[in-house]
Amino acid sequence: MQSLTLANGREIPQLGYGVYTMTSAEVEKHLPEAIAAGYTHIDTANAYFNEVAVGRAVKASGMRREDLFITTKLFPQSYPYEQCSVDIDASLERLGTDYVDLMLFHQPYGDYVEGWRAMEEAVDAGKARAIGLSNFPVHKVEQILEVARIKPAVIQVEINPYWNQHALKKALAERGLADAVFEGWYPLGHGDEALLAEPVFRELAEKYGKTPAQVVLRWHIQEGNVVFPTSRNPEHMAENIDIFDFALTEDEMARIDALPQHCYYTVPEEPPAFVLARNDYSKQA
Ligand code: NAD
C-alpha cells in the first residue's frame, strides 16, 4: 500500500474502500471482507445511511483505530454553524469513534462558508484530523479560502480516465491549494463497461498480466489520486488492491491522458432536489 501525506502531516492510504450505495447489511457483510483483504481506508457519508454499520464492522474487525483511516461527509442541512458541530458529534457517535481522519462537506450548497468555522473547530477539538470539500467548483472553493484558517486538505471530486480533472488541479494549485490531495470518485467509471473495454486498457492489461481495472487504478495512483472503488465481490477487492507491483511508463500515462474527456455527472450550480430534501441520519439500521 502506498500513502500520500496530507497538509496536516498525516498519511492517507492511496487506495481505500468506498461504501456508497451499500445497505447497512451489505456493509456488515463486505467491509470485513475488505479489511481482511488489506484495506485500511474507508470512505462513507451521512447521506449513505450506513455509518452505524461501518462503526459496527470496524469494531468487529479488531483493528486498532489508529491503523484505520475513516472518512465521512456532511450534507448541506448540517452546514449552518450551530448545526454543524452537533452533526459532527452525531456522525462520530454513529461511527463509534472519537475522531474521523477526514471530514468533508459533501455538496457545494447552503451555508458552507459559515459551516467551515465549525469544521475548523472540530480539528481544534481533535474530532476531525483533516477537513476538506467534495464536489465544490473553483469559485466556491475560493469562498472557503477567503475565510479559512485551516485550508481544505482534500478535494474529493469525480476523477477517472474520462475525466482526469487536470484543469481543476491546476486551477486550485494556482489558488494556494498545491498541497491538497485529490480523491477521485467513480474511479472505475461507476460500472461503465465501456471504460474498462477501452483498447488502451486491454492492451496494457495484457502487457503487464493485469486486468483493465487494475490498469485504470494504477493510472490513478501514478496521477497522485486517492481512490476507493466500491466492490461487493471479494475477487475484485483483492484485484483492486494488487496494483503496487507494476508501473505504467510515461508514454502509457500520456496515452491514457489522451482519451476523450467527459464527466459522468455534472454538479449543478443550484442545489438539486435530492440535496434539498432533509434527512434524519439517526435513523439507520
Ligand atoms: P466505482 O468507479 O468505484 O465503480 C464501482 C463499480 O465498479 C461497481 O459496479 C463494481 O462492481 C465495479 N468494480 C469494482 N471493482 C471492479 C473490478 N476489479 N473489475 C470490474 N468491475 C469492478 O464507482 P462508485 O462505487 O460510485 O464510487 C466509489 C466510491 O467513491 C464510493 O463508494 C464513494 O465512497 C465515493 N463516491 C463519492 C461521491 C461524492 O459525491 N463525494 C460520489 C460517488 C462516489
Image (cartoon, rainbow, N blue to C red):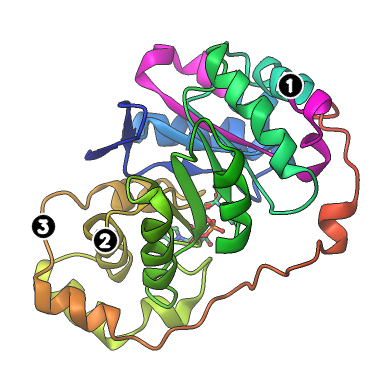
Earlier along the polypeptide chain: callout 3 or callout 1? 1
Label 2 sits on what residue type? Glu
* Residue located at (37% from left, 30% from top): 40
Foreground disc of the pair 3, 1: 1
Earlier along the polypeptide chain: callout 2 or callout 3? 2
Quadrant location of residue 272?
A: bottom right
Judge the density around disc 1: few (<14), some (14-19), many (≥20) Cα neighbours within 10 Å: many
* Residue located at (44% from left, 39% from top): 153
Label 3 sits on what residue type? Phe
- Which residue has dot 3 on it? 246
Residue 194 x %, y %: 45, 83
Residue 65 part of the magenta segment = yes
Residue 19 x %, y %: 57, 43
User: In the rendered view, does 160 fall on the left or right side of 49?
Assistant: left
Nearer to the camera, 145 or 102: 145
Q: Quadrant of the N terminus?
A: top left
User: In the rendered view, does 61 fall on the left or right side of 28?
Assistant: left
Q: Does the residue labelled 3 lie within 8 Å of ligand 1?
A: no
- Tell me the SS state at disc 3: loop
Q: Quadrant of the C terminus?
A: top right
- Which residue has dot 2 on it? 223
Earlier along the polypeptide chain: callout 2 or callout 1? 1
- Which residue has dot 1 on it? 85
Specify the segment rendered in magenta. 57-84
* Residue located at (48% from left, 50% from top): 155
Residue 53 part of the magenta segment = no
State how many labels appear.
Answer: 3
Label 1 sits on what residue type? Ser
Nearer to the camera, 215 or 185: 185
- How far separated are the C-alphas under marks 2 and 3? 14 Å
Judge the density around disc 2: few (<14), some (14-19), many (≥20) Cα neighbours within 10 Å: some
Residue 133 x %, y %: 57, 46
